[in-house]
Amino acid sequence: MRIFTSKTELSFFLSELKNQNKTIGFVPTMGALHQGHLSLIEIAQAQVDIVVCSIFVNPTQFNDPKDLEKYPRPIETDIKKLEETRCDVLFIPSVEEMYSAGESWDLDLGYLEKVLEGKFRPGHYKGVTQIVKKLFDVVKPDVSFFGQKDFQQVKVIEAMVQTFQLPVTVVTCPILREPDGLAMSSRNVHLSVVERAQALALSKTLHQTVAAFPESSIADLKQQAENFLNNSDGVKLEYFEICNAETLRPAESKEEKSLIALLAATVGNTRLIDNIILK
């Protein structure tokens, strides 16, 4: 695996490969890699010639400086995992390499940045699009791979790609779960043993929603889920929504072509998100 810290050197290296008609796949991450991240690498390997992974804890997408400060950064472990997965290229730039002083970014994401995560973490997706656009400009991937767990992020990236007419295909990869159902997340390391057990209420709610979907109205499904989570020990619910999976607007009918249930909750001091496709 080749490791780069310089935009210029990485760009030159990849342009040489492109000149050889190699297809480039890209998996941007913030590190603290788990099997969910590695599954993105494996999916990419089946679709492209060269897989590039980036690790960069992006400061512009954190609302809370404390959250940024405590974000896990086990870089040596991450490198070992990527080597074992046979990733081709790793890009680990510094903040100074990616941002210049006094830099600004203003991309109007409209409705998408005002709901769900955008509502609870204002400015978050502006930071996401800012860094992903920068990384796309360096890597110039043919295909980029993102996890379904942050479904709203995928929709935001798709909107950005469309706005700038970027020649990159965005692929959404399935959520990987622990054997007990908990969605894999870099934040799970912050859960105590008790909190880890309490966090299972999130995936349990989503699977209950799937089971009840054929017989229940959207309003009833939402009410049942909120009641269950609000009565679950240690869980502080932020939102549970059933949305159109294309627009992320609240679902008005079960007849809509594609539907998704999304939630966010805090367990202990750890904020978790999860979702499940209903239709």
Image (tube, rainbow, N blue to C red):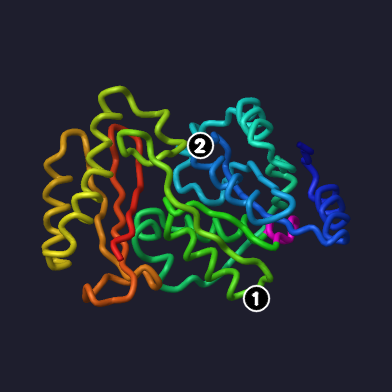
Which residue reaches farthest front? 46
State the predominant SS element of the stretch in magenta.
Answer: helix
Say which of marks 2 and 1 sits in front: 2
Quadrant of the drawing holding the C terminus: bottom left
Residue pointed to by mark 2 = 35
At x 52%, y 31%, the residue is 72
143 left or right of 235 in image: right
- From the image, tell me which residue sits under label 1: 165
- Does residue 174 appear in the picture of this structure? yes
Q: How crowded is the residue under tag 1: few (<14 C-alpha within 10 Å), some, or many (20+)?
A: few
Name the residue type under label 2.
Gln
Q: Position of residue 38 (x, y in %)?
A: 56, 40
Going 26% across and 54% down the picture, which residue do you hit? 239
Q: Position of residue 232 (x, y in %)?
A: 15, 38
Q: Earlier in the sequence, mark 2 or mark 1?
A: 2
Report the span colored magenta: 134-141
Q: Given the image, on which type of amino acid does mark 1 rest?
A: Gln
- The answer to whether 120 appears left or right of 79 in the picture is left
Distance between the alpha carbons at the discs numbered 2 and 1: 32 Å
